[in-house]
Image (tube, rainbow, N blue to C red):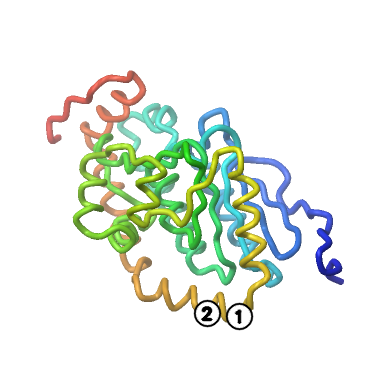
């Protein structure tokens, strides 16, 4: 039995520990990236957990909205560069698996009947951060949020479907500049160019994101999910995911990729040789 109108039911814990948490109440599944000590950097464990959490939501027809968020200071600062760098010349094989899970999780997010409302604080960078933002339906960001593509600065390419989605959101020329320059995009600009839905005060972020989630949870679920499906079908994102993954795997095995990761960790400019 559902809670009376205006009342909030007691949240259910669907996944209570690990790198991704999942709680449910009132048709809203709150999915939290839970590696705050590394800015929710994506590694293989987080990828497995994210895919599992999304598939749990797929199997629960009462979920009308997924409220995606990150624990701690940052939504997601991208891949866990220290773990990636530790793989050395085996990085290509390692990232092949990581990228495969990321692509599957993004495809599953896009195919969810539920509307994905994402809450962004701090950095949203790389395939993990910017990629998940691109794959969301509604994005609410704090005024201090920052967005960064980041892939080419470590000798890699955009993934998580961003190479297709970002040009549709902000236009081809602007997307090209964002990917190639790796400049930081402030929240106000992100809103102006169509990357995100709304900017709010940092202090109000969680309340505003939950307010948005509750708004969509009260909509006509069949109509909202059908509309979402039509919009995403028009982009053809899933057709591009295998090529993104293949290219990422090839580039991550290069010396330039290892140099780029080392430069980020050592906080210096990289020296790329094209090898």
- Disc 2: which residue: 226
Q: Secondary structure at mark 2?
A: helix
Q: Which residue occupies 37% across, 67% down?
A: 238
Q: In the image, residue 243 lies at what x, y percent?
A: 28, 59
Most foreground residue, 3 or 29: 3
SS label for mark 1: helix
Q: Residue at x 62, y 64 (%)?
A: 65
**Residue 91, picture quadrant:** top left
How many numbered marks appear?
2
- Work out whether 43 lies above or below 213: above
Q: Residue 129: image x %, image y %?
A: 44, 45
- Whether residue 128 is situated above or below residue 221 in the rendered picture: above
Mark 2 and mark 1 in contact (Cβ < 8 Å)?
Answer: yes
Quarter occupied by the N terminus:
bottom right
**Nearer to me, 245 or 200:** 200
Classify 211 as above or below 188: below
191 or 178, nearer to the observer: 191
Q: In the rendering, which numbered label is found on residue 222? A: 1
Residue at the (67%, 66%) spot, across then down: 63
Q: Position of residue 85 (x, y in %)?
A: 37, 28
Residue 134: give x, y in percent of width and height.
41, 56
Task: Give the position of the C terminus as an image quadrant.
Answer: top left
Q: Is residue 94 visible?
A: no
Residue 177 is tagged as: none
């Amino acid at each position: 039995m559902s809670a009376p109108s205006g009342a909030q039911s007691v949240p259910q814990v669907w996944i209570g520990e690990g790198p991704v948490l999942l709680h449910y109440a009132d048709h809203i599944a709150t999915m939290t990236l839970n590696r705050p000590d590394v800015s929710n950097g994506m590694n293989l464990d987080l990828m497995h957990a994210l895919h599992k959490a999304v598939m749990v939501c797929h199997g629960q027809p009462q979920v009308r909205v997924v409220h995606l968020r990150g624990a701690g200071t940052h939504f997601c600062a991208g891949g866990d560069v220290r773990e990636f760098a530790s793989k050395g010349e085996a990085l290509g094989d390692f990232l092949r698996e990581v990228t495969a899970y990321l692509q599957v999780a993004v495809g599953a997010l896009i195919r969810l009947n539920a509307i994905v409302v994402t809450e962004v604080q701090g950095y949203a960078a790389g395939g993990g951060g910017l990629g998940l933002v691109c794959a969301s339906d509604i994005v609410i960001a704090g005024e201090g949020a920052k967005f960064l593509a980041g892939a080419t600065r470590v000798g890699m390419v955009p993934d998580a479907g961003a190479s297709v989605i970002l040009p549709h959101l902000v236009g081809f020329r602007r997307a090209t500049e964002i990917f190639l320059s790796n400049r930081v995009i402030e929240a106000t600009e992100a809103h102006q160019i169509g990357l995100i839905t709304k900017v709010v005060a940092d202090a109000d972020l969680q309340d505003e994101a939950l307010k948005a989630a509750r708004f969509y949870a009260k909509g006509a679920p069949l109509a909202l999910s059908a509309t979402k499906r039509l919009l995403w079908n028009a982009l053809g994102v899933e057709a591009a995911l295998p090529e993104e993954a293949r290219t990422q795997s090839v580039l991550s095995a290069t010396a330039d990729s290892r140099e780029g990761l080392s430069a980020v960790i050592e906080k210096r400019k990289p020296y790329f040789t094209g090898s």
